[in-house]
Image (cartoon, rainbow, N blue to C red):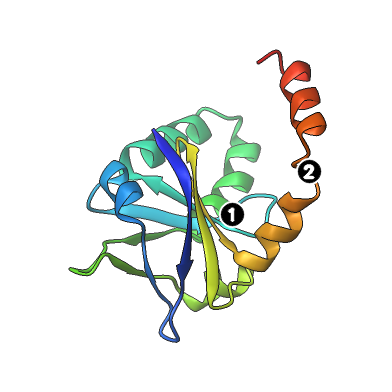
Amino acid sequence: MLIGGFRCVVDVKGRLNFPAKLRGDLGSTFIITKALGERCIDVYSLEEWKKKSEKISTLPMKKARELGRVFFANATEVEPDKQGRIVIPQELREYAQLDKEVRVVGVSDHCEIWDLASWQTLYQEGDSPEEISALLEELDL
């Protein structure tokens, strides 16, 4: 299970030293792609990517084509180097508005790479104990 949050840096060449804890769970090669509906990058193990691909292939033809265009066209297979770094393509860095500092978070079955300022803006507002409690109650967790 992919869990935890890590503050990391993307260098000028677009390299990110991907957290070792998450690398171990993702495997030696994984997929990065644009997150659908959010300005971050999704990271999938090859196994999880295959599951997502199979789900898409079961959708009605028009929906599968529409989703597939976005989901697959923006995906890149990455393999960490000996230092654990991956290269994030410029197009994905621009999409997620990644600056130097990023937040890498485990989200159960995948990871997300967020620009640190975007992450802080998004999640500082909704993390009061009362709001979290209300959300847990609403979701029956």
Question: How many other residues sit within 10 Å of disc 2, few (<14), some (14-19) or many (≥20)?
Answer: few
Task: Name the image quarter holding the C terminus.
Answer: top right
Q: Is residue 83 above or below residue 112?
A: below
Q: Which mark is residue 126?
A: 2
Q: Residue at x 39, y 37 (%)?
A: 48
Task: Name the image quarter holding the N terminus.
Answer: top left
Q: Residue furthest top?
A: 140
Observer-side mark, 2 or 1, equals 2
Question: How many other residues sit within 10 Å of disc 1, few (<14), some (14-19) or many (≥20)?
Answer: some
Query: Looking at the image, how many numbered discs can be counted on the residues?
Result: 2
- The amino acid marked with disc number 2 is Gly
Q: Is residue 58 above or below residue 140?
A: below
Q: Nearer the viewer, residue 125 or 104?
A: 125
Return the disc, 2 or 1, that comes first in the chain's sequence.
1
Q: Nearer the viewer, residue 84 or 96?
A: 84
Q: Residue at x 46, y 58 (%)?
A: 75
Q: Residue furthest front?
A: 129
Residue 33 place in picture, x, y as percent: 50, 57
Residue 71 place in picture, x, y as percent: 54, 51
Label 2 element class: loop
- The amino acid marked with disc number 1 is Val
Q: Residue furthest bottom?
A: 12
Q: CA distance from mark 2 to mark 1?
A: 29 Å
Q: Which mark is residue 70?
A: 1
Q: Is residue 35 above or below residue 98?
A: above
